[in-house]
Amino acid sequence: MHATVLRAHPSERPEIALRADHLEVAYRDRVVWRDATFQIRRGEFVAVIGPNGAGKTTLFRLLLGLRRPSGGSLEVLGEAPRRGNPRIGYVPQRHTIDNDTHVAADALVRLGYSGTRWGPGWHFQAQQEAADAALDAVGASDLAAKSLGAMSGGELQRVFLAEALVGNPEMLLLDEPLSNLDLRRSRELVEVVHGLVRSRDVTTLLVAHDINPLIECLDKVIYIANGNVATGPPETVLTSASLTELYGVPVEVLHDSRGNIVIVGGENPHE
């Protein structure tokens, strides 16, 4: 006998993937942010932005069940957050990969599959087929046998994304996958993620410093600053009036000649 991991049929998945009601999070006596009330629907592509130290990664820790809120309530995929939830795929901010890392890409992705399957019925062939499918989904089939230590930053991010995707999650949490990528590689990775969101109906939250590579693909923005959280479509949140209210000081949202958004004022809001 072996265990199986049950996946809800798409029609049985909750329409609201993420629900926060007056959510508050604090470290010791310091409130990071408070009174956050918002909803993210199934299959939405959402950017999480704001200055350094605002609590963007803290949101992911809450969703992953690694930290409990100090107030309010949080529901993820119709249930309370819990550690090791196989319904969530996660790409952390930092991976330790150096030139001497000789693990092949498909071996790493197989580990992601093994983490959601166990028992004697799960053989190498099933693991390999799942890894191959995940690498193909992110356009990285040609990297399957390549050593991680020999990869560029853009190639590594695709492999990490495949690792998170291999268990067929309902939600993806991507913590700054665009950092250290140039503009071209950033846009390419965003296109890959956007394609996955649409083709697999997977709810995706992506932490980023720069909104511009993402702006055309987003359904919503979660903007965290000054202990407050604003959520909504980009054209609603990324306005001078909205961010001035969020920061509590004058903030101006400008557009350069290429249509890029530039945010001026507040506490380094452009970071």
Image: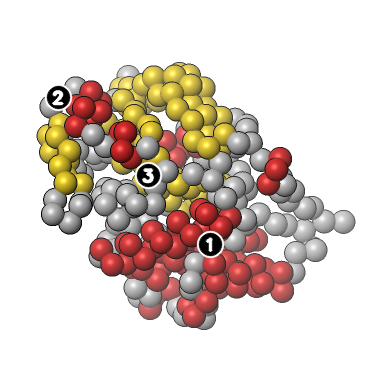
Q: Which residue is mark 2?
A: 249
* Amino acid, disc 1: Glu
In front here: 40 or 103?
40
Q: Secondary structure at mark 2?
A: loop
In contact (CB < 8 Å): disc 2 and disc 3: no
User: Quadrant location of residue 96?
Assistant: bottom left
Rendered location of residue 209, percent (x, y): 27, 48
Dot 2 or dot 1, earlier in sequence = 1
Are discs 3 and 1 less than 8 Å apart at CB? Answer: no
The residue labelled by disc 3 is 47
Mark sitting earlier along the chain (2/3): 3
Identify the image quadrant of residue 258: bottom left
Query: Mark 1 — residue?
Result: 163
Q: CA distance from mark 3 to mark 1?
A: 21 Å
For the residue pair 21 and 93, the one nearer the viewer reads as: 21
Kindly identify the residue that appears in the image at 38 percent across and 78 percent down. Answer: 150
* In the displayed structure image, the side of residue 157 where residue 85 appears, left or right: right
Relative placement, left or right, of 10 versus 98 is right
Q: Give the residue type that dot 2 points to.
A: Val
The reply to whether dot 2 and dot 1 touch (C-beta < 8 Å) is no
Residue 3, position as x, y percentages in the image = 79, 53
The residue type indicated by label 3 comes to: Ala
Along the horizontal axis of the image, is 1 left or right of 79? right
Nearest to N terminus: mark 3 or mark 1: 3
Q: Residues within 10 Å of mark 1 (few under 14, many from 20)?
A: many
Q: Residue furthest right?
A: 1
Above or below: residue 52 compared with residue 157: above
| Residue 83 image offset from top left, x and y in percent | 57, 40
* CA gap, disc 2 and disc 3: 23 Å
